[in-house]
Image: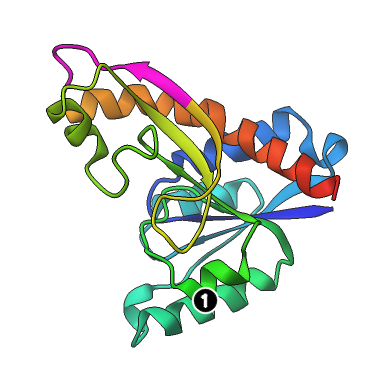
């Protein structure tokens, strides 16, 4: 069985979409894959409570309790590795990861970013897209590399930018597409890992 571990920092709406897709699409039976654990760097992340209601191991590891980024990443890596993950999924995990952490999960860690990469890496993507006069925005699922919001693109979804959009309105439109493409991209990634 291929174990999937999800990392969140907040409500975990993408995590919820993935867990629900795994159940509805019967990943355990059809893909030999299952979501087993959810971790957050924030003890108050509301997504942890939801994950527990789904029978998942859900733990917080407060990054503020560590002296350095490296110390936090090392502790997180140990906690994740206890679940023998085939795939580590960043779902609104708002931490820049150290090169050592990224190298440890090379080829088996994915992220979703709310822009059409390579455009608008980093933060404030929706405001930046509106300010730039973009006619389209969207979301990108990509493999994680040491360079922020780079790595092989696994899936993208496009939405229109409308004349009266605010960053919040555009974000909500993009999020509906994130919930659609992220589970699909993960299922395809798991299938690729199984065929190796």
Judging depth in this view, the residue of 139 and 94 nearest the camera is: 139
Q: What residue lies at 82% left-to-right and 42% top-to-bottom?
A: 28
Q: What residue lies at 51% left-to-right and 50% top-to-bottom?
A: 151
Looking at the rendering, which quadrant does residue 108 occupy?
bottom right
The answer to whether 143 appears left or right of 97 in the picture is: right
Residue 54: % across, % down: 63, 46
The answer to whether 18 appears left or right of 63 in the picture is: right
Q: Is residue 127 magenta?
A: no
How many other residues sit within 10 Å of disc 1, few (<14), some (14-19) or many (≥20)? some
User: In this picture, is 60 found above or below 187?
Assistant: below
Query: Which residue carries the number 1 mark?
Result: 100
The answer to whether 2 appears left or right of 41 in the picture is: right
Judging depth in this view, the residue of 23 and 108 nearest the camera is: 108
What colour-coding does the image apply? rainbow
Residue 13: % across, % down: 45, 39
Judging depth in this view, the residue of 40 and 188 nearest the camera is: 188
Q: What residue lies at 53% left-to-right and 72% top-to-bottom?
A: 101
* Residue at disc 1, secondary structure: helix
Q: What residue lies at 13% left-to-right and 13% top-to-bottom?
A: 164
Magenta stretch, residue numbers: 157-165
Q: Is residue 158 magenta?
A: yes
Looking at the rendering, which quadrant does residue 155 occupy?
top right
Q: How many marks?
A: 1
Residue 173: % across, % down: 34, 21
As drawn, which residue projects farthest toward the top?
Answer: 163
User: In this picture, is 77 found above or below 159?
Assistant: below
User: In this picture, is 194 found above or below 82?
Assistant: above
Residue 136: % across, % down: 31, 19
As drawn, which residue projects farthest toward the bottom?
Answer: 67
């Amino acid at each position: 069985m291929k174990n999937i571990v999800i990392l969140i920092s907040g409500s975990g709406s993408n995590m919820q979409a993935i867990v629900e897709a795994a159940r509805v699409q019967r990943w355990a039976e059809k893909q030999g894959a299952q979501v087993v654990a959810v971790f957050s760097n924030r003890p108050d992340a509301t997504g942890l409570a939801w994950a527990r209601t789904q029978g998942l191991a859900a733990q917080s590891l407060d990054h503020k309790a560590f002296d350095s980024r490296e110390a936090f990443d090392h502790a997180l890596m140990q906690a994740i590795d206890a679940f023998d993950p085939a795939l580590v999924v960043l779902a609104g995990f708002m931490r820049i990861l150290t090169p050592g952490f990224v190298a440890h999960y090379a080829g088996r860690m994915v992220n979703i970013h709310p822009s059409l990469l390579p455009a608008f890496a980093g933060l404030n993507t929706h405001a930046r897209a509106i300010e730039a006069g973009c006619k389209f925005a969207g979301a990108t699922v990509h493999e994680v590399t040491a360079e922020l919001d780079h790595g092989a693109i696994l899936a993208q979804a496009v939405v229109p930018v409308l004349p009266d959009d605010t960053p919040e309105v555009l974000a909500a439109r993009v999020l509906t597409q994130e919930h659609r493409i992220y589970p699909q991209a993960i299922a395809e990634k798991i299938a690729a890992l199984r065929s190796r």
